[in-house]
Amino acid sequence: MYNEIVMDHFQNPRNVGEIADASGVGEIGNVVCGDILRVYIKVKDEILDDVKYMTFGCGAAVASGSMMTTLAKGKTVEEAKKLTNKDVAKALGGLPPQKLHCSNLAADALHKAIEDWMNKTGKGDKLDG
């Protein structure tokens, strides 16, 4: 059901954990399947210096969180804001249609973490694009 990329990110997830002094935190849940994904970001000089995640979910949710953190880490805040669920699914080599919502969790949680950082720092007006 899953391709090699998805299986690799599920079996060897990258960037799992919490950032104690996170610049921003975002959490998204899906009431239908019960998956929850929380993202922590550390922003330095407008760059996502570190990105970690924790999830309670299926293999696709684990893989999506792992891939999203890999894609977002090192990007500017503006670049990370443009990361979409389609980008995550594409980087994973595709997900089964019934699992595409898992990539939504990852990208949406990242966007919430960025929004949290913008609210804490008052940078919202400067970064809206």
Image (cartoon, rainbow, N blue to C red):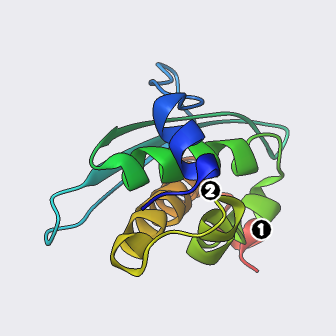
Q: Quadrant of the C terminus?
A: bottom right
Residue 41: give its label: none
Which residue is pictured at 27% across the width and 51% down the height? 36
Amino acid found under the numbered disc labelled 2: Gly
Q: Nearer the viewer, residue 29 or 21?
A: 29
**Up-down relation of residue 54 to residue 95 (above or below):** above
Q: Nearer the viewer, residue 121 or 107?
A: 107
Amino acid found under the numbered disc labelled 1: Lys
Residues packed near mark 1 inside 10 Å, few (<14), some (14 to 19) or many (20 plus): few
Image quadrant assignment for residue 50: top right
Instruction: Report x, y in % for residue 26.
Output: 42, 51
**Up-down relation of residue 16 to residue 46 (above or below):** above
Residues packed near mark 2 inside 10 Å, few (<14), some (14 to 19) or many (20 plus): few
**Up-down relation of residue 99 to residue 14 (above or below):** below
Disc 1, SS = helix
Answer left or right for 21 relative to 93: left
Image quadrant assignment for residue 54: top left
Q: Quadrant of the N terminus?
A: bottom left
Q: Residue furthest top?
A: 20
Q: CA distance from mark 1 to mark 2?
A: 8 Å
Disc 2, SS = loop
Q: Nearer the viewer, residue 8 or 115?
A: 8
Instruction: Report x, y in % for residue 126.
Output: 77, 68
Which residue is pictured at 50% across the width and 47% down the height? 63
Instruction: Report x, y in % for residue 86.
Output: 62, 76
Answer left or right for 9 relative to 49: left
Which residue is pictured at 70% across the width and 72% down the height? 125
Answer left or right for 33 relative to 14: left
Instruction: Report x, y in % for residue 29.
Output: 25, 60
Residue 126: give its label: 1
Which residue lies under the disc numbered 2? 122
